[in-house]
Structures are given as C-alpha cells and as structure tokens.
Image (cartoon, rainbow, N blue to C red):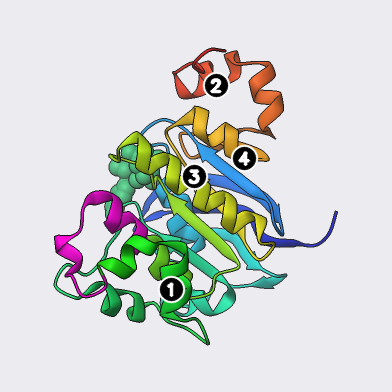
Amino acid sequence: MADPILSLDNVVAGYGDTTVLHGVSFDVPKGQRLAIIGRNGVGKTTLLGTIMGLTQLHSGHVAMGGRVIDRVAPHRRAGTGLGLVPQTRDIFPSLSVEENLLSGLRGDATLEEAFALFPRLKERRRNGGGQLSGGEQQMLAIARTLMGRPEVLMLDEPLEGLAPVICDMLMETFETLSADGRHTLLLVEQHTELALDFADRVIILDAGEIVQDASAEALRADPSIIERHVGVGLAGA
Ligand SMILES: Nc1ncnc2c1ncn2[C@@H]1O[C@H](COP(=O)(O)OP(=O)(O)OP(=O)(O)O)[C@@H](O)[C@H]1O
Ligand SMILES: [Mg+2]
C-alpha cells in the first residue's frame, strides 16, 4: 500500500483529564472514502477534533503525510492539509456568505470555485449566514472548509437535520469531491445506509475504541455487525 496520508497511532485523547478515545490507530490511504459510524456519544466528534488538535492528546501520535503534527496548533492544521466541517457548522451568522467563505481562504482558492460547486451560494452571496436555510448553511460550512484547499476533508454528520433532497444533493457533492482525485474524505454519519453507499471502508467506534474496521461490502454481507455495534439494522438488508 502507498504511504498513508493520515495516520493515527495509539491515540489516547479527551477533554482535560477525561479520556474519551482509548488507543485509536488507523491509517488512511490517499483518496480513500472512509466512513466513521457509531452510537451517540462514542467519540466520533472527539476523534475528528483530535485530528484537528482541538482536544487534549494524552498519548499517541497523529501524522499527516508522514509528518507527526501532535504539536501543531489547531489553527495551523489547515496548513498541513486538514479540513474539518464541524457538526455545529460554525458559520458566522452576521457575516455575508462571501465573507464567511473568505474567512476560510488559503492559498489560491477562489469564490468562483465555491459557487461552481454550490450555485445556491452564489445566489445568496450577499445574504447573512444567519439568513440561510439549514441546508444552505451546511453548503456554506462545506464550501468554507474547501476554501482552505484540504487534502483530507473531514465531515461531521453533515446530513444531520436536513431534508432528504438536500442529503442526496450533498452526497453527490461528496462523490464529486472524491472523484476529482484531490480529496481524501472522512465522513462521520448516523445515516448508516448512506455512509455505506459512499464509503470504501467503514470504521465503527464504540466507547472510544475501534470495534470494526472493514470494507463497506463486508458490512453489507453481515448486517448483524452493524446491528450489534450501532444498534440499528440496514434498511432492506
Ligand atoms: N467539550 C467537552 N468536554 C467534556 N466532555 C465532552 C466534550 N465534548 C464531548 N464530551 C464527551 O465526550 C464523549 C464523546 O462525545 P462525542 O461528541 O465525541 O461523541 P459523538 O460520537 O460525536 O456523539 P454524537 O453522535 O452525539 O455526535 C461524550 O461522553 C461526551 O459527553
Ligand atoms: Mg458528534
């Protein structure tokens, strides 16, 4: 296998003295579509936060492109090729769509690229972030992260609370981003069915540990694994 773009080595992390992740290790090859699933509160957001340097790393290592980034400050991690679309979206409600996008700008990314991906944002470019619908806010959060030109794009439950038609549109966008050969995607998702449709590989977290690391086909072939660890079966499985 080629060298991984992202690598976690026995990561123990949490908040202050509280440990949430208990020794998490995995390597992500460039271009992979990795889904991370698991029940509420098992540590999915903490895992993405730890990769971004937003939690307390008690022990272990995080590396990007072979370089250990444990000591790289969170606001500098975009410069290592990481991008996170947080579960809380965190757009600026009082700034316009354009201003929100520019806040994520790094290098030679342009507003036109964002508008090409999400034409709706172009129509709304002068509106305040707080005036957007939930779906539009998620488009803005994704587009803003893409303005940082991430090689590894991490999405924390991007479909949460959105109408099915918007979910389908966003999943198509993730396909597009993955297919362009420039992005490795980590998708945290409670919609297990959509996650499996999208992913090459699925990691299941439970109580801060990896309990399964398998191909999407393997999990489809044995739905009891998902049922056991996530508590819901696959529709039609
Ligand atoms: N800022 C924080 N300070 C202290 N504990 C936290 C903090 N954020 C999360 N936790 C705790 O860490 C554990 C894992 O939370 P996390 O948000 O990573 O779960 P999750 O898998 O993303 O859940 P969900 O599916 O609900 O988003 C939980 O016990 C949670 O209460
Ligand atoms: Mg979460």
Which residue is outermost to the right?
1
Q: Are marks 4 and 1 in contact (CB under 8 Å)?
A: no
According to the picture, the residue beneath numbered tag 1 turns out to be: 74
User: Which is nearer the eye, 129 or 90?
Assistant: 129
Spatial CA span between label 2 and label 3: 21 Å
Q: Are marks 4 and 3 in contact (CB under 8 Å)?
A: no
Q: Helix, strand, or loop for circle 3? A: helix
According to the picture, the residue beneath numbered tag 4 turns out to be: 199
- State which tag comes first along the sequence, 4 or 2: 4
Residue 168 within the magenta-colored segment of the rendering: no
Q: Which mark is residue 205?
A: none
According to the picture, the residue beneath numbered tag 3 turns out to be: 171
Spatial CA span between label 1 and label 2: 33 Å
- State which tag comes first along the sequence, 2 or 3: 3
- What span is in magenta? 125-141
Q: Helix, strand, or loop for circle 1? A: helix
Question: Please, what is the three-letter code of the amino acid marked with disc 1?
Answer: Pro
The image quadrant where one finds the C terminus is top right
Of tags 3 and 1, the one toward the viewer is 3
* Image-based side of 199 in relation to 126, left or right: right
Disc 3, ligand 1: is the CB inside 8 Å?
no
Q: Are marks 2 and 3 in contact (CB under 8 Å)?
A: no
User: Which is nearer the eye, 13 or 101?
Assistant: 101
* Image-based side of 139 in relation to 161, left or right: right
- State which tag comes first along the sequence, 4 or 1: 1
According to the picture, the residue beneath numbered tag 2 turns out to be: 226
Question: Please, what is the three-letter code of the amino acid marked with disc 3?
Answer: Met
Indicate which quadrant contains ligand 1.
Answer: top left
